[in-house]
Each structure stands twice: as structure tokens, then as C-alpha cells.
Image (spheres, rainbow, N blue to C red):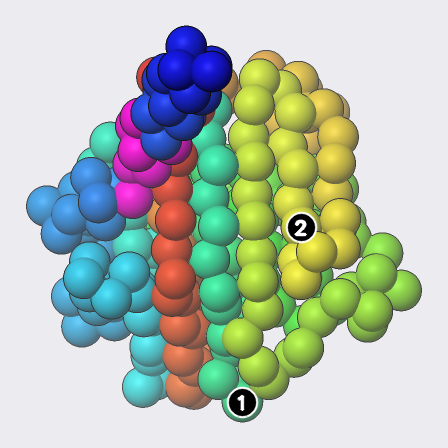
Amino acid sequence: MRLSRLLLATAMFAALSMSARADDTEDFLKAENWQGRADLFKIDAKAKTIVGETMEDPKYNTFFCTKKNYGDFELSFKVKLHGGVGNSGFQIRSALKDDKKFVVHGPQVDIGKGYWGSLYGEGVGGMMKASSPETIKKAVKETEFNDYKIVAKGTKITITINGETMVDADFPKLPGKDAKPAPSEGIIALQVHAGYPKMKVEVTDIKFTDLSKK
């Protein structure tokens, strides 16, 4: 009996230790790990929140970018487009192309009317896989917070919103006629989109696990 209890306690301790090691949120959200236009983006690591807000049309898509590159990872969060206005998204395994305007190219997990949960190739050839209109209508609360989860592992990308699977497929290549291999790692970046006089995207309850280290 004592041995069984000891084995159970050891197993529970190991599971708790693995769980603690699996959460990389604190390191991910350190302010020094992010760069972007300070007039448009704010990060609060303690509240696990990032906000992007425009008061006029920026005229180009701009991003709040990690300085570190990430390969395999799991990212979950709650996200709201205030008033249902605007378009945003998280770039994954992407590349910073302009460190003044913070323009980014690469796969983007979309946040916006008609595109929620789609995987789009920002600057690299267009749509990679669109969410179905039926699934968007079923899953998304346009003016409220939505639970979002992204899992990138190898060439497979899985995107869920409020428990509904939007995309679950392998993406070995980027879109386009001269499709290049999809990047295996790169930055993660939050977008505010051009074309809106005002928009606000709020991302909170962020949780991040770097699966490349596991």
C-alpha cells in the first residue's frame, strides 16, 4: 500500500512538473520579446493581453511582432474585434520584411468578418485554406470575445474557434504557382489591417507552449 502511494505521488509530481515546464507564456509575453508601432499596439504581460488600435487608417497592414522565432507551438487566447469592425490575425512562422513599418510576410491565422479561422498567405500568394461560411456562422460571435486556439506541429496547422475546427490540414508549401516550401519556423505577429478609419482588436487570456523544446 505504501509503495503504491509512493508511486502515485511520484507520478503526480512528474505530471505537475511536465505541466509547469509546458507553459512558456511568461517568456513569450515579455515586453522585450515584442516590437511594433508603439502608437498602435500595447502589451500587458501581467494581464496576458495585447491590444491593437487605430484612430485613422494606417494605409498599410502593420504588425506587433515577436523578436524570437518559433517552430512548433500551441497558442490559445480570447479575441474580440470591438464593434465587429476591422480585420486582424496572427502571423505564424513568418518573416519581418520592414522594421520601420513592421510589414510581415507569411502564413496568417485570420480574424475578421468572412475570414475567421482561415489560413491566409500574407504577402506570399493569398489564401491557403478558407474556413467555410457555414462553420464561421456556427462558431463565431462577431462582436464578442471568441476562444481561439492555434496548433502548429510539423506541416500540420489546426485552428479552432469556440471549440469548432476551422482548419485542420498539412501545409508543406506556401500558395502560388511557384510555391516555396512553407517555413518551419519564424516570428508570431498580431495584425491591424489597413482600410479602416478606426479599429480595435483585443487579445487576452493568452497561453503559449513552445512545442519545439518538448
Rendered-image quadrant of the C terminus: top left
Task: Inspect the magenta stretch and tell me whether residue 23 lies in it.
Answer: yes
User: Can residue 60 be seen at all in this image of the molecule?
Assistant: no
Mark 2 or 1: the one toward you:
2
Give how far apart the Cα atoms at labels 2 and 1 are: 22 Å
Mark 1: which amino acid? Gly
SS type, badge 1: helix
Is 2 on the left-hand or right-hand side of 167?
A: left
Query: Residue 6 shows which numbered tag?
Result: none
- From the viewer's perspective, is 174 left or right of 64? right
**Which circle marks residue 83 in the picture?**
1
> For the point 43% across and 86% down, which residue is it?
197
Task: Give the percent coordinates (x, y) of residue 194.
Answer: 45, 69
Quarter-wise, where is residue 10 in the image?
top left
Q: Position of residue 123 (x, y in %)?
A: 52, 42
In the displayed orientation, state which residue is furthest to the left: 32
Q: Tell me the residue at 57%/81% (across/down).
A: 144
| Residue 205 % position (x, y) | 39, 62
In this view, 113 is above or below 210? below
Query: What segment carries the magenta color?
Result: 17-25
Q: Residue at x 13, y 52 (%)?
A: 31
Helix, strand or loop under label 2: strand
Q: Which residue is mark 2?
A: 160
| Foreground pick, 190 / 37 | 190
In the rendered structure, does residue 194 fall within the stretch colored magenta? no
Q: Position of residue 186 (x, y in %)?
A: 38, 28
Q: Which residue type does callout 2 highlight?
A: Thr
Dot 2 or dot 1: first in sequence order is 1
